[in-house]
Amino acid sequence: MSTLRITPIPCLKDNYAYLVETPDACAVVDPSEAAPVIEALGGRQPNALWLTHHHWDHVGGIEALCARYPELEVWGSAVDAQLRRIPKQTRAFEHGDQARWGGHTIDILHTPGHTKGALVYVTDGHAFTGDTLFGGGCGRLFEGTPEEMLASLLAILALPPETHLWFGHEYTVANLRFALSYGGHHPETAQRLKDAEALRQSQLPTTPSTVASERATNIFVRDALKRPHGPEAIASFTAARLAKNVA
């Protein structure tokens, strides 16, 4: 059983930051704004910020949090460090790196596609996927190729099936509605949509998902999971992503 306590923090319109706690340490993932994070901390002193990528709606709270908590480490990718795209960044990671935090090992996946420097942080049965993988969906390709993005998604979905996936935006209902309109009736997707709608009607988050759930219902990887190395998988992913862009 995981010894981590993870709390989603709604920010901006539909973003999530996350509070990650152990008895001895506290980290914040993707603080798009400071005020909701400070409220969620409730007096706790964070020691690290984990940034999945450099977009403003994931890093906007860094400056204020570092001013309030001067000892904060700011984690991000080596790509973003080189380009100086994450404010106050103190640690830079590449694919396959590991870090120690709060008695836990954090495994780093470099997942380009949405951005060149996108990272996923994996620890103790949890993965923070930022804007690479959403509930039932994936991010837009702002800086990467379809080949890169699909490879990144498949790397995440190669984690153990029970791994909890904590994503960057509350897009699950829209993603699953798109999947059913684009890919036709799919019983598991239809049931997941009902469950997600019920959560949102109760003002509850749909995060986290799991690897098993995404493998069963995420239309962007459906064909690739059947034939991951062929050109058909890239073509299928590209077509779905382009259709979602205008949906």
Image (tube, rainbow, N blue to C red):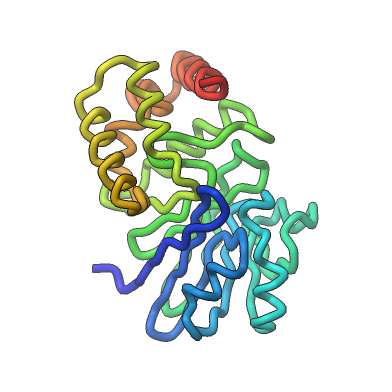
Residue 107 lies, with reference to residue 145, above or below; the image says below
Q: Quadrant of residue 8?
A: bottom left
**Where the N terminus falls, by quadrant?**
bottom left
Residue 181 lies, with reference to residue 10, above or below; the image says above
Q: Is residue 198 left or right of residue 5?
A: left
x, y percent for residue 94: 62, 55
Picture mark count: 0
Q: Is residue 59 left or right of residue 244?
A: right
* Residue in the image at 42% along x and 32% along y: 174
Q: Quadrant of residue 143?
A: top right
* Residue in the image at 59% along x and 70% along y: 35
Residue 65 lies, with reference to residue 245, above or below; the image says below
Residue closer to the observer: 179 or 99: 179
Q: Is residue 13 left or right of residue 159?
A: right
Residue closer to the observer: 155 or 164: 164
Q: Is residue 82 left or right of residue 71?
A: right
* Residue in the image at 35% along x and 65% along y: 124
x, y percent for residue 105: 44, 69
x, y percent for residue 233: 45, 19
* Residue in the image at 33% along x and 59% along y: 125
x, y percent for residue 55: 67, 49
